[in-house]
Image (cartoon, rainbow, N blue to C red):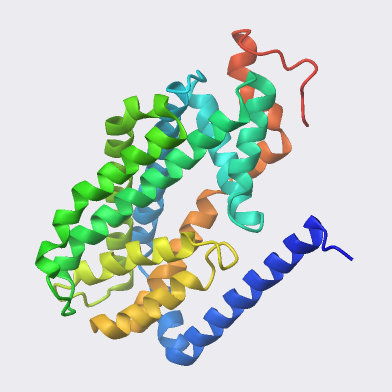
Amino acid sequence: MPVTKRVKNYLKLALKILLSGAAIYYVSRKIDFGEVWHAIQNADDLYLVIAFLLYVLAVLFSTYRLNTIFRALPLKISNWTNIKLYWMGLFYNFFLPGGVGGDGYKVFLLNKYFGVKVKKLLSAVFAERVSGLSVILIYILALVYYINYDIPYKGWFFLLIPAVSAGYYLFLWIINRSLTKVFWKVTLWSLVIQGIQMLVVVSILKAMGTSVNGQWGNYLFLFFLSTIAAAIPVTLGGIGAREMTYAVGAGYLGIQQGHAVALSLIFYFISLTSSIPGLFYSFYTHRIFKHELRNNTINLSDKTTS
């Protein structure tokens, strides 16, 4: 009897849950969770609020990055509409298995209400995701020089940065050539967004009172490395992959493992909390497009999904 697509999806989900559980178990055996909990419990509220506000700012800038890509398709929607749509997508990405549910639903809605082809919309969504990952890789290549680990020729890793940028440009050219015209704008947005993410990490470390002792490069390097690890779709939404990266990496770089894992958990909680406003628009999807309705850009009278 052939295996149905639904069964395959369930098997993939079960495997991701298993891998996430295995990673969390590994981390629990490698570090002292009492130290992790103590770091979280005694974190300074003011710095945590600053970290949260900075993260929200990064999300807002991400919406402008995505809208820059949309307008190159071309797809013209207001920034406010795109912010609501983006926040709904964030919520779905956290609460739907696989971490791409929100992106898929955004593509569905934009195709339904604006008639833009799915292929074009998918190219825009992938372009935004890959832009973020390419800039993360750029920051990693720049930070390699500052980590406390002996890597051959690590002082020359920054020379690979132009190759990463060229690779992203080639990616845009392959999936949708019209997107290459916003290459520089999107890259600049990504550099700013990830720069703000670094400030979030710094704020969290300040909140925990972590003794950094000039090891900022180590923590920031692990943060970006864990982000890439979480983006690889082998665990449930990156759960376990981030913490395992911090736990193992902290051992190699000689930084506090407990604080490194606590940093990962606090960052995850901040990102999770910031996605909550998207819950409203997941129930009232049609309200996302109120601006377009007033301006007769689209007609929702017979297309309301909620």
Horizontal and vertical percent position of residue 170: 34, 39
Q: Quadrant of residue 226?
A: bottom left
Horizontal and vertical percent position of residue 55: 39, 50
Horizontal and vertical percent position of residue 204: 34, 64
Where does the C terminus fall, quadrant-wise? top right
Q: Left of 189 or right of it: where is 9?
A: right
User: Count of labels shown?
Assistant: 0
Where does the N terminus fall, quadrant-wise? bottom right
Let me know if residue 300 appears in the view: yes
Q: Left of 120 or right of it: where is 41?
A: left
Horizontal and vertical percent position of residue 268: 48, 62
Of 180 and 221, the residue lying toward us: 180
Q: Left of 257 or right of it: where is 97?
A: right
Q: Residue at x 50, y 35 (%)?
A: 123
Q: Quadrant of residue 149?
A: bottom left
Let me know if residue 41 appears in the view: no
Q: Left of 128 or right of it: where is 158?
A: left
Q: Residue at x 40, y 31 (%)?
A: 64
Q: Residue at x 60, y 15 (%)?
A: 292
